[in-house]
Image (cartoon, grey):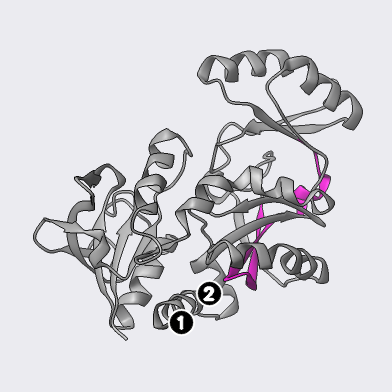
Amino acid sequence: MSLKIAFQMDPIGPIDINADSTFRIAEEAQARGHSLFYYTPDRLAFDQGRVTARGWPLTVQRVKGDHFTLGEEQTVDLSDFDVVWLRQDPPFDMGYITTTHILDMVHPETLVVNDPFWVRNYPEKLLVLNFPELTPPTMIARDLDTLRAFREEHGDVILKPLYGNGGAGVFKLAHADSNLASLHELFSGINREPLIMQKYLPAVSKGDKRVILVNGEPVGAINRVPAAGETRSNMHVGGRPEKVALTDRDREICAKIGPLLREKGQIFVGIDVIGDWLTEINVTSPTGIQELERFDGTNVAEKIWQAIEAKRAV
């Protein structure tokens, strides 16, 4: 089976080929005989009933500083492709949301991964609200007094933007910390979105586990340990990846959320688990493939393509 694959992603030039999950997915696709096309989200368009993208045929290679070659620039009709990957990074703003609406127009005849309708309706910090028995105490609110009452009840908390990513804007507030009002004022000046507040989990000092699921099934995990003096464990802000095994609790969490992910076309998902608690379900542009492959020797990208190829074969 040879498929025509389009990648909607951020600029390919600056990526780290030893860490970027999109690069690894493209590399595996190429090895399997699929043809690749690349464009950035700003080059996606709806044009008189057609969904088009202006980009380039793509070839990748694992050579630092020389990791991609582009063919001649062209405008393509995405309905002519077998698969489109929705892989630009958040922020999950109106620009991002608009791309999901446009890609909806070619899906599922062209398989969009992950399903853009449910990416739009199940962003990372909201999908977990469907599973309160798996998560730490959580509040989504904009009203300052409401947030104060939650902290008064639960003590130390984590405060972060509802649609942020990569650890940006994440604050730990101790019960006696007097900065909540100032942070609320800061965030309110940036946008009109609510904030998310969660009970602080001391187990984060031992790591924030990223569990990768393919078509609803766990394939492995990495542990991300915060740098000294940090609460955040995201690798973007210095978190250290470590080899880790799936626990019975991890498998229990995956068993409860997996059927929904599978039903909603979320083929490649990364969940975050701190201690025994699920904190996020990442469906927009999850990462961690390359680290997991190095630690476990599991070809995660192969499993992802096997799931996609099975869907295309139907």
Residue corresponding to mark 1:
310
Q: Tell me which residue sits at (56%, 46%) in the image.
A: 121
Question: Looking at the image, which is closer to me, 18 or 73?
Answer: 73
Q: Check if residue 208 falls in the magenta segment.
A: yes
- Left or right of 283? Residue 229 is right
Query: Whole-Å distance between the Cαs marked 2 and 1?
Result: 22 Å
Residue 1 placement: quadrant: bottom left
Q: Tell me which residue sits at (28%, 49%) in the image.
A: 40
Residue corresponding to mark 2:
293
> What is the chief secondary structure element of the magenta stretch?
strand
* Callout 2 amino acid: Glu
- The residue at the far front in this view is 49
Question: Looking at the image, which is closer to me, 200 or 278?
Answer: 278
Q: Residues within 10 Å of mark 1 (few under 14, many from 20)?
A: few
Could you tell me residue 147's position as x and y percent?
77, 23
- Left or right of 200? Residue 234 is left
Mark identifier at residue 60: none
Front position among marks 2 and 1: 1
Q: Secondary structure at mark 2?
A: helix
Could you tell me residue 139's position as x and y percent?
76, 33
Residue 82 placement: quadrant: bottom left
Report if residue 283 is visible in the image. yes
- Left or right of 312? Residue 12 is left
Q: Bounds of the magenta span?
A: 198-225
Mark 2 and mark 1 lie on one chain; the one further toward the N terminus is 2
Q: Residues within 10 Å of mark 2 (few under 14, many from 20)?
A: some
Q: Is residue 219 above or below residue 40?
A: below
- The residue at the far left in this view is 72
Q: Is residue 181 above or below residue 258?
A: above
Q: Is residue 123 above or below residue 155?
A: below
- The residue at the far right in this view is 153
